[in-house]
């Protein structure tokens, strides 16, 4: 039974190997299958040091482990020896050896099994019979990448477009706010001298004191001398209810209004059905 320390060490090593494989797949020559040239290969022949797609990996398995030893990038556990082989080779170096005499010929879609067997089992297009050291293989200088962990910065075009659009909206909103301020701001006087600064009223509306109430002596009165305030108004209403004459501030009720009101009260107090 393995100890906890050993299990943690194995997990850390596996995570490290997975990261190296993912970084190797970011190289331009490893982004396509070494045989059929389809995108995003997720399998590998670790002894040949090349990445292949899932369909081509099945043909590699049929070749036998004496020719090709296949592992999954995502599902299998890798050893340090296997990772080292993938770092040293890669699709470009491997194909430089296995397809040295291939020329312009390309694989046919419906005959990939025959193509892979001719390439690795029969060695039809190799330059020499013995597998050389990968460091001795000369590759294209433009595409050559040192056998180390490669990191490529990938920018999403969708995010870039959104950032551009957001920038345009931001500058447009700023320009609109500046134009509104220019339209609403007062025009400075041309009589102000160059060194003289215009005075600005800094008193806020919320800080202004409410106006003081008018004194009692300033209350408006009518031509008959009756004051126009609430207490006087109530006083005259009480006088009118007691039968006192009107001062003119409140008009006198028309003749017969008292009788109409009395008749209304009498009618309301009569029992229903009486005449």
Image: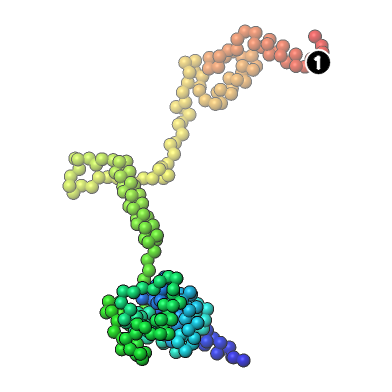
Where is residue 244? Give x, y as percent.
Answer: 61, 14
Estimate the x, y position of residue 31 in percent, counting from the top left.
39, 73
Where 53 sits versus 264, above or below? below
Q: Point out the image quarter for the C terminus.
A: top right
Q: In the image shown, does 165 or 30 lie closer to the viewer?
A: 30
Q: At 33% from the left edge and 49% from the top edge, which residue is drawn?
A: 172
Residue named by callout 1: 272
Please name whichever residue, 193 or 245, is drawn nearer the observer in this view of the structure. 193
- Residue that extends furthest to the top in the rendered view of this protein: 255
Give residue 104's quadrant in the image.
bottom left
Residue 208 point in image, percent of width and height: 41, 42
Report the side of 272 relative to 49 (left or right): right
- Rendered image coloring scheme: rainbow
Work out whether 137 lies above or below 158. below
- Front residue of this view, candidates 242 and 6: 6
Q: Is residue 173 left or right of residue 70?
A: left
**Can I make out residue 182 in this image?**
yes
Label 1 CA crowd tier, 10 Å (few <14, some 14–19, many 20+): few
């Amino acid at each position: 039974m393995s100890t906890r320390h050993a299990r943690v060490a194995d997990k850390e090593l596996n995570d490290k190997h997975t990261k190296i494989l993912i970084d190797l797949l970011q190289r331009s020559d490893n982004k396509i299958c070494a045989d059929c040239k389809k995108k995003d290969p997720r399998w590998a022949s670790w002894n040949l040091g090349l990445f292949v797609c899932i369909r081509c990996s099945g043909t590699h398995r049929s070749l036998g482990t004496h020719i090709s030893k296949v592992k999954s990038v995502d599902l299998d556990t890798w050893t340090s020896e296997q990772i080292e082989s993938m770092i040293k080779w890669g699709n470009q170096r491997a194909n430089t050896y296995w397809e040295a005499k291939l020329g312009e010929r390309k694989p046919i879609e419906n005959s990939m099994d025959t193509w892979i067997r001719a390439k690795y089992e029969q060695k039809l297009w190799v330059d020499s019979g013995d597998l050389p050291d990968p460091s001795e293989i000369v590759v294209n200088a433009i595409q050559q990448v040192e056998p180390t962990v490669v990191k490529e910065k990938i920018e999403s075009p969708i995010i870039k477009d959104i950032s551009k659009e957001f920038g345009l909206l931001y500058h447009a909103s700023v320009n609109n706010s500046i134009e509104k301020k220019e339209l609403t701001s007062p025009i400075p006087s041309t009589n102000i001298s160059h060194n003289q600064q215009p005075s600005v009223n800094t008193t806020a509306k919320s800080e202004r004191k409410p106006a003081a109430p008018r004194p009692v002596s300033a209350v408006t009165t009518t031509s008959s001398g009756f004051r126009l305030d609430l207490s006087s108004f109530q006083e005259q209403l009480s006088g009118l209810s007691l039968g006192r004459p009107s001062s003119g501030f409140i008009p006198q009720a028309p003749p017969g209004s008292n009788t109409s009101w009395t008749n209304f009260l009498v009618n309301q107090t009569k029992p229903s059905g009486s005449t």
